[in-house]
Amino acid sequence: MTHDVDRPQRERLLADILSRSGLPNAPLAMPKQTLESQAGWLLAIYSRFVRRTQS
Amino acid sequence: MSRELRLPWAVLFRRLGAMIFSLLASLAATELFIRYANTDGMSAVDDFRCALIAISTAWLAWGAALSLLGLLYYPETIERLPEETPLKGRTAVLVPIYNEDPVSTFSRVAAMDEGLAALGVGQFFDFALLSDTTNDAIAEEEAMWWARLVHDRDAANRIFYRRRSSNTGKKAGNIEDFMRRSGGGYDYALILDADSLMEPATILEMARRMEADQGLGLLQTLPVIVHARSFFGRAMQFSASYFSPVFARGVAMLQGNEGPFWGHNAIVRVHAFAESCGLPPLNGKPPFGGQIMSHDYVEAALLARAGWKVRLDPDLTGSYEESPENLLEHAKRDRRWCQGNLQYSRLLFAPNFKLWSRLVFAQGVMAYVSSPIWLLFVITSISAPYFAPRPDYFPEPHFPFPIFPADETMMAVLLVAGIWCLLILPKMVIVVRGIFTGDNRSFGGTVHAFASTLAEVVFSSLIAPLMLWFQSRAVLQVLLGADGGWSAANRGGGRVSLGDAWSASRWIVVSGIAALAMAWFMAESIIVWLIPIAGPMVIAPLLIWATSRNAETGRLGYLFLTPSERQPSPVLTARARILGDWTALESPLPEELTAAVEAA
């Protein structure tokens, strides 16, 4: 695609376009969820087992 | 929100039935294999092969069970708004973009917006073009074509464009950024991909179904592939149009309230999504840690965990996407999906997920792990005769005559036939069913549909060994800690030269020749069995090159006909018209805009 506008004009056009774009302002909270694996429990049980057998 | 949704008994029985079917198929395959392998005594390698065949067959049977269930599908009762009740909620149509061609993407937006306006509901639907584009030149084009789009659709304050300076969280982060900034202004968000296109009537119906059922958190449609041109692309397009709807109905039969989310062509309830689907990065580095790559399954599981219904409605047609045009692009996309799916192994035991969501994660992992399992089976089968115990022709002491082991080749034939049945039978049943339902007519009639199905079976059998290797390599790379990154999708990228095909697949050619050579020296008798796998490997570059060629016209054009090719739907036609008009323009910029800036 060729655009018959020179570079400065193109930049002015872009600045003008981008000044009018953008999203509406209506914020909404999006809390992070907990996803870490319960395999941690297995590790804890295994560690306890290892400690007990060592003692 | 936290509420318990009861799983209908019928769904529970179907899930159990599908599992039992898979287990029985696996047991039958294992039994046949033991009989075959036991002729010369079971070695440790045979035991290992036995485990591999059990897992692989269970996985194949699960796919067959979904297809067969799809054939038995009957629609559940769906809550709908009465026809005279107008829509109240507002929907944001989200179009995440990442270095794609803006003319192509924005012309789809124009077609959908035009259709919604024609239905008289344009005021309920805004579009948000969410750019994560990293290439500045493409970003400039995006801004200019956005100006054209807004001008042509008279859509100031209705079609928005924003570009993120940093693409944190990739596509999921892009959507999350929208939710945090602007989600409060909308009831629903229709999540698309850059190549998505949906019938405006379908979009409207989706919003109405969300409004009718206040417990529905996400509603997924089945996107079918359109605009394919190459042999590879058109085979995939046919498969997606002819077989996938049956498969999707099978998924729907098992979904209960925990249906799928495939990442696009789905609508979500904004506040349900915002309160439930904030994805944290996982501990550790990629590929297993860091940002969640295949976010869709996780978001579906999170919505279900929070008590929202997630549903696939197979009756919602008019949902389209595009697909890679050659095997190399397909494998590149698959590499990304592989990494994302293997990351699910981290989430199998995450807190409070529904059991079904965990099974879905396991299926996601199996979708890729099944390839190295098959590969291991092939490799161990080549080496098995080497490890087999020496035959004992005099097992009975003092018995004067030799006893020859029974020939159990028939068991192996039955095993292969059974596996082929699991793969092919559902497809053939779909052809037969199409005769009675009339579905074959939109695929050019039963003769066309049958010929296309046969061609698809041959084609998928030929590329399966190649995908086996590509996927096995991808799994190995992920296990070794190689992060595949996030490459831009190149769905339109077509023809592959023979040189490029050779460069990308010579390692497969060498592996194929090595496999045949090993079999020649170690187990000559299995060469015949190996040829369907090693043969396509040896000619991999030719296959990749030949299937990337245009197959829209000539004799090949008669194969793989789909309804969207034979009779494009209104939105496909509108999009083609707009794309044609825009491509003919000298500049995307409207004259008024250029003049106004010049004057200033």
Image (spheres, coloured by chain):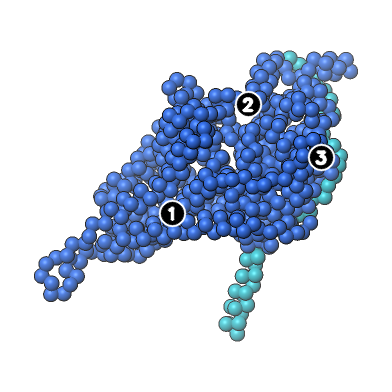
Chain colours: A cyan, B blue
Give SS at disc 1: helix
Residue B278 visible in the snapshot: no
First in residue order: circle 1 vs circle 3: 1
| Residue topped by disc 3 | B89
Tell me: B128 left or right of B530: right
Q: Amino acid at mark 1?
A: Thr
Task: Estimate how packed mark 3 is, as few (under 14), some (14 to 19) or many (20 or more) residues with alpha carbons within 10 Å.
Answer: some
The residue closer to the viewer here, B176 or A19, is B176
Give SS at disc 3: loop
Separation of residues labelled 2 and 3 (CA atoms): 27 Å
Tell me: B549 left or right of B292: left
Report which quarter residue B484 is drawn in.
Answer: top right
Report which quarter residue B9 is drawn in.
Answer: bottom right
| Residue topped by disc 2 | B569
Q: Position of residue B283 (x, y in %)?
A: 67, 58
Chain that bears disc 2: B
| Residue topped by disc 1 | B57
